[in-house]
Image (cartoon, rainbow, N blue to C red):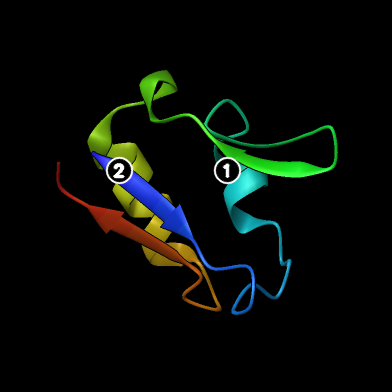
């Protein structure tokens, strides 16, 4: 599973970071996505909650 983030769409609501902080995190002022730290089902659920649609799931 690959998750992409569109910075131009992001409204910085923080739903992803609050819901799965081990997957979606800010490191050195950069947004990092580490899909190894949760199940694909959990990640997809959080992506679907993104209010701006900035996150997208892509199957490898």
Q: Return the x and y of residue 35 as percentages of the image width and height.
A: 39, 30
Quarter in which the C terminus is drawn: top left
Answer left or right for 23 relative to 45. right
Where residue 50 appears, as percent x and y from the top left, is 50, 67
Q: Quadrant of the N terminus?
A: top left
- Identified at 71% across, 67% down, the residue is 13
Instruction: For mark 2, give the secondary structure.
Output: strand
Give the CA separation, mark 2 to mark 1: 18 Å
Examine the rendered structure and indicate whether residue 52 appears above or below residue 35: below
Q: Image point 36% across, 42% down: which residue? A: 43
- Percent across and percent down for residue 49 are 45, 64
Q: Is residue 47 toward the left or the right of residue 23 in the image?
A: left
CB contact under 8 Å: marks 2 and 1: no
Mark 2 or 1: in front is 2
Please tell me in which quadrant of the rendered image residue 48 appears: bottom left
In terms of sequence position, does the residue under pointer 2 or pointer 1 come before the other?
2
Locate residue 46 relative to residue 41 in the image: left or right. Answer: right
- Could you tell me how many numbered marks the image carries? 2
Q: Which residue shows up at 29% across the image and 55% down it?
A: 57
Among all residues in the image, which is located at the extreme left?
60
Disc 1 secondary structure class:
helix
Q: Is residue 4 left or right of residue 33?
A: left
Which residue is under mark 1? 19
Q: Which mark is residue 2?
A: 2
The 10 Å Cα crowd at callout 2, few under 14, some 14 to 19, many 20 or more, is few
Residue 47 is situated, as x and y percent measured from the top left of the image, at 41, 57
């Amino acid at each position: 599973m690959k998750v992409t983030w569109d910075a131009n769409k992001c409204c910085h609501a923080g739903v992803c970071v609050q819901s799965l902080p081990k997957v979606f995190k800010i490191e050195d002022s950069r947004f990092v996505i580490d899909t190894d730290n949760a199940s694909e089902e959990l990640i997809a659920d959080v992506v679907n909650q993104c209010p701006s649609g900035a996150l997208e799931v892509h199957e490898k």
